[in-house]
């Protein structure tokens, strides 16, 4: 269904390069995935991978502080970076005549970051990131849900037990020494995938990549991810936490361990979450929102994580007068109900997922990111072209088996938020 | 510890290559026999078609006493037709892989969809059924009303929403629609019923005065034919609403704290009424805003974030609607730095207005805005949304095609003059959602105006809803 042209090369220093030409608009997306995320953090330094991502915007040997943003913005480009469990990605989308600018900036910080680092910049970005955490987690209704859910789903020695943002304390404890070590350990070309997508072809793009990245020496392979990576297929029981918080409406979260993204069964889980909450004919919406009027809104999705076990989460927001026990029972019933899913429901979920994928890859920046992702996580950028077939191959029987084996009471983390004022 | 500094062969900033032209396909279109404005753009590269039906049925057309009616009616629109109930309708669309999204803003209610090209006819047939024969079933009205009431309560506990809602109440007079939150207040939404929704739809969901937009691999003629074929049975005319109450700056700068005891951060809004959406002066305002607070490297963000570390980010933006709008500087900062951050924000705002931008800043902002423009016109859905703006704001068909040219002509003096014609930092209202016990004294000491402390609307323990009195 998808047939994007692309080529793949590995430079002598180990950097993997994907070039995916598409001349339809004079725009190029540059996307760089480093194989490092919150899973690689050590104890006492939660949140460091993300803080380090911020430091990557503080300049490098030949780029002054703020110049990275200035140069890309004045070139008419957009840029950002995100940190996630298994990776950190950096990306620029810009008019294609500025391709070299993006390559120069990315290579300067891959090869020559440390000379530009200083304690003042670290102090500044520690403050920025602590504010980010407060804004997104601490000053936001339900803002800490993932922190709580991850602690319930994973044991203490699993790297997904802590969040990407990390704790306020750990963010504040980061030192210059940490910056140096982290950079030298993980920000090596052999731990990265660079994708160029858009108005550039292999003949023009590859020599430029070689020119700017070629002189960066390769490094040691990064150390193994710390911790016990496979915590087991299921949680083992129903674990729960109830929080009274400044939230307007009761909400129940239910999470389960699922196979990792790299396991074919992950696609079954992905389609299952789509059956649950994608669109208004979905199970949770139809039953809990429309028919039973139990819920105000519903969400369900599977995290595409690769380290040991991934997880899926569903949540249901009630009304002020809702009985949280009833909300929870409603959600559990729909998850268990997937054991009798109808063929048509699977077909609908797959049709919606297909349209969503086609919409995503319409955007060059997303297409580039997906190429980097499949290369970094699967060693196979070309998987992108087979995603539609992979979704279509999920059968109703597989969804039923998945529900019966995985969505059971032995594999549930339940987190209830209750409005504080309702507790008297 | 670290290796000795390695030299770099290519230490110099590379020069850009020659500019590659960006061609936006032309806008085509006409009016159907029923008076529906049709606008389309042909894109051959993708297998997808995006489209929308743009109804002149925004929340600004609703009387203040029925605030929330446009939003509620839009939400119930997909709640079933004469022939199908809500779930049957959802199944039919989603079986095609289509999500039909209804979104209601101040100026329009928009039904938008994206489908694969071969499903377009089936999709339009269902769209036509929805707009021609909506059923507005009692059960769906009741359900949506309950959802909307719950959503209003959610806003009360979300500091960012609290801040912007309070700012709008401060900037616009009570008789003006922009005074209130888009989706209404508890009292007005509680009073909405099926008859109100049906009446609203009957008067405002009409083809003559509405728009139909398609972006995909279809010629203008094919789109016109599709509109005639699928939507001809939809009839009637919608009346434009003109002349909303005038908006004036308050005589004295309002300074308000919404008290949230123990809040770890403060949401700060610094804002004032702003100009309506129109091409006049728009390029100069866009350039000015990018420099002040619109871009990452804006004066505000470089100061508050990159220099002081007060915040994760600060932005300024114009919200330009059909009948006016607002200009707002927004940020969330750690509680103990709130007043310091406000001081720095005002310093930047005042400095910019007094001196205007530098040549260099204007050059960079022009290049930024002209360059990112194609990035926002990439997908069929993005383009459809841009075409919808032509209908909503009565913009000429070449409006988007000419935008970059207008941006490139902007000069520093014009930026200063145009920004000054609309903005005045000495009268901008200040709204802070945060811990008043910590903030009130230092804020008063700043001498911006009389500080008024309010409490957030509260949730009832049980029974009827209680919102704060005296607004």
Image (tube, coloured by chain):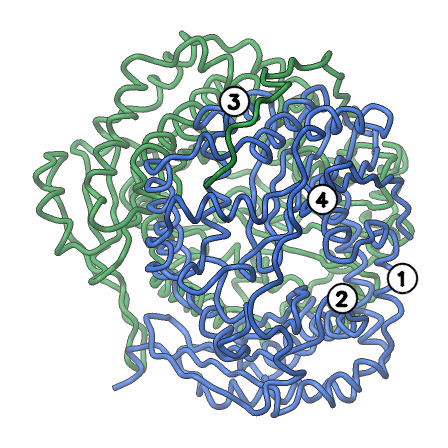
Between residue B282 and residue A304, name the one nearer to us: A304
Secondary structure, mark 4, is strand
Where is B179 relative to A254, above or below?
Answer: above
Mark seen at residue A193: 4
In the rendered structure, which disc, 4 or 3, sits on the residue that comes first in sequence? 3
Q: Colour of chain A?
A: blue
Q: On the rendered image, what quadrant is the C terminus of chain B found in?
A: bottom left
Question: Between disc 2 and disc 3, whose residue precedes?
Answer: 3
Tell me the CA gap for discs 4 and 3. Answer: 23 Å
Q: Secondary structure at mark 3?
A: loop
User: Picture coordinates of residue B227 (x, y %)?
Assistant: 82, 43
Q: In terms of secondary structure, where does tag 2 sit? A: loop
| Chain coloured green in the rendered structure | B
Is residue A139 visible in the rendered image? The answer is no
Q: Which residue is mark 2?
A: A262
Q: Whole-Å distance between the Cαs marked 3 and 1?
A: 46 Å
Q: Is residue A7 above or below residue A151?
A: above
């Amino acid at each position: 269904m998808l047939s994007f042209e692309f080529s793949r090369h590995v430079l002598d220093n180990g950097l993997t390069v994907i070039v995916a030409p598409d001349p339809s608009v004079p725009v190029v997306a540059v996307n760089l995935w480093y194989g490092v995320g919150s899973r690689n953090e050590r104890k006492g330094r939660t949140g460091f991978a993300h803080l380090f991502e911020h430091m990557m915007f503080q300049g490098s040997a030949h780029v002054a502080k703020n110049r990275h943003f200035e140069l890309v913005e004045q070139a008419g480009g957009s840029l950002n970076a995100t940190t996630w469990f298994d990776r950190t990605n950096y990306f620029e989308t810009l008019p294609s005549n500025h391709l070299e600018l993006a390559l120069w900036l990315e290579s300067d910080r891959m090869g020559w970051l440390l000379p530009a680092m200083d304690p003042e910049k670290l102090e500044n970005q520690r403050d920025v990131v602590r504010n980010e955490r407060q804004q997104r987690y601490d000053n936001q209704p339900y803002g800490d849900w993932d922190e709580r859910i991850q602690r319930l789903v994973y044991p203490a020695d699993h790297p997904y037990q802590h969040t990407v943002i990390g704790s306020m304390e750990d963010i504040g404890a980061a030192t210059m020494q940490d910056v140096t070590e982290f950079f030298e350990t993980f920000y090596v070309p052999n731990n990265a995938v660079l994708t160029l997508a858009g108005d550039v072809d292999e003949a023009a793009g590859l020599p430029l990549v070689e020119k700017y990245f070629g002189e960066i020496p390769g490094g040691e392979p990064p150390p193994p991810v710390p911790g016990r990576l496979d915590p087991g297929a299921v949680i083992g029981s129903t674990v729960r936490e109830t929080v009274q918080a400044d939230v307007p409406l009761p909400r129940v979260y239910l999470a389960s361990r699922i196979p990792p993204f790299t396991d074919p069964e992950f696609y079954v889980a992905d389609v299952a979450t789509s059956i649950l909450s994608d669109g208004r004919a979905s199970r949770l919406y139809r039953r809990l929102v429309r028919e039973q009027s139990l819920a105000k809104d519903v969400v369900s999705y599977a995290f595409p994580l690769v380290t040991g076990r991934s997880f899926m989460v569903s949540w249901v927001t009630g009304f002020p007068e809702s009985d949280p026990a009833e909300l929870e029972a409603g959600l559990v019933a729909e998850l268990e109900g997937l054991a009798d899913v109808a063929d048509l429901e699977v077909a609908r979920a797959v049709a919606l997922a297909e349209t969503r994928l086609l919409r995503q890859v319409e955007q060059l920046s997303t297409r580039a990111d997906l190429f980097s992702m499949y290369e970094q996580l699967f060693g196979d950028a070309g998987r992108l072209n087979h995603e539609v077939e992979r979704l279509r191959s999920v059968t109703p029987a597989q969804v039923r088996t998945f529900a019966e084996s995985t969505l059971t009471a032995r594999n549930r983390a339940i987190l209830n938020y209750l409005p504080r004022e309702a507790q008297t | 510890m670290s290796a000795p500094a390695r030299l770099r062969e290519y230490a110099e900033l590379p020069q850009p290559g020659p500019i590659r032209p960006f061609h936006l396909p032309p806008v085509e279109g006409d009016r159907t026999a029923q008076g529906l404005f049709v606008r389309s753009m042909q894109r051959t590269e993708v297998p997808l078609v995006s489209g929308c039906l743009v109804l002149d049925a925004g929340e600004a057309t609703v009387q203040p006493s029925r605030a929330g009616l446009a939003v509620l009616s839009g939400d119930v629109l997909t709640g079933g037709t004469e022939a199908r109930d809500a779930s049957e309708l959802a199944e039919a669309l989603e079986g095609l892989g289509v999500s039909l999204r209804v979104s209601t803003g101040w100026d329009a209610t928009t039904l938008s969809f994206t489908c694969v090209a071969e499903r377009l006819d089936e999709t339009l047939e269902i769209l036509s059924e929805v707009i021609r024969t909506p059923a507005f079933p009692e059960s769906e009205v009741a359900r949506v009303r309950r959802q909307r009431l719950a959503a209003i309560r959610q806003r009360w506990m979300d500091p960012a929403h609290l801040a912007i809602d309070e700012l709008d109440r401060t900037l616009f007079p009570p008789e003006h629609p922009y005074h209130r939150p888009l989706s209404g207040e508890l009292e007005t939404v509680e009073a909405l019923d099926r008859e109100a929704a049906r009446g609203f739809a009957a008067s405002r969901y009409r083809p003559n005065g509405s728009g139909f937009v398609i972006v995909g691999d279809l010629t203008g003629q094919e789109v016109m034919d599709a509109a005639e074929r699928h939507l001809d049975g939809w009839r009637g005319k919608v009346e434009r609403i003109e002349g909303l109450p005038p908006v004036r700056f308050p005589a004295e700068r309002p300074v308000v704290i919404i008290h949230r005891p123990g809040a770890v951060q403060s949401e700060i809004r610094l804002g004032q009424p702003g100009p309506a959406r129109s091409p006049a002066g728009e390029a100069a305002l866009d350039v000015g805003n990018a420099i002040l607070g619109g871009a990452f490297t804006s004066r505000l963000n470089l100061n508050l974030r990159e220099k002081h570390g007060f915040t994760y980010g600060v932005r300024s933006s114009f919200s330009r609607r059909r009948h006016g709008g607002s200009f707002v500087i927004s940020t969330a900062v750690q509680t103990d730095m709130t007043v310091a951050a406000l001081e720095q924000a005002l310093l930047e705002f005042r400095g910019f207005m007094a001196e205007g931008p530098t040549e260099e800043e204007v050059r960079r902002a022009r290049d930024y805005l002209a360059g990112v423009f194609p990035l926002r016109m990439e997908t069929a859905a993005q383009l459809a949304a841009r075409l919808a703006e032509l209908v909503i704001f009565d913009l000429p068909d070449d409006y988007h095609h000419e935008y970059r040219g207008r941006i490139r002509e902007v000069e520093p003096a014009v930026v200063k003059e145009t920004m000054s014609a609309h903005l005045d930092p000495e009268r901008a209202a200040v709204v802070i959602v945060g811990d008043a016990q910590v903030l009130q004294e230092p804020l008063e000491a700043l001498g911006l105006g009389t500080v008024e402390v309010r409490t957030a609307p509260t949730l009832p323990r049980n029974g009827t809803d209680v919102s704060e009195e005296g607004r």
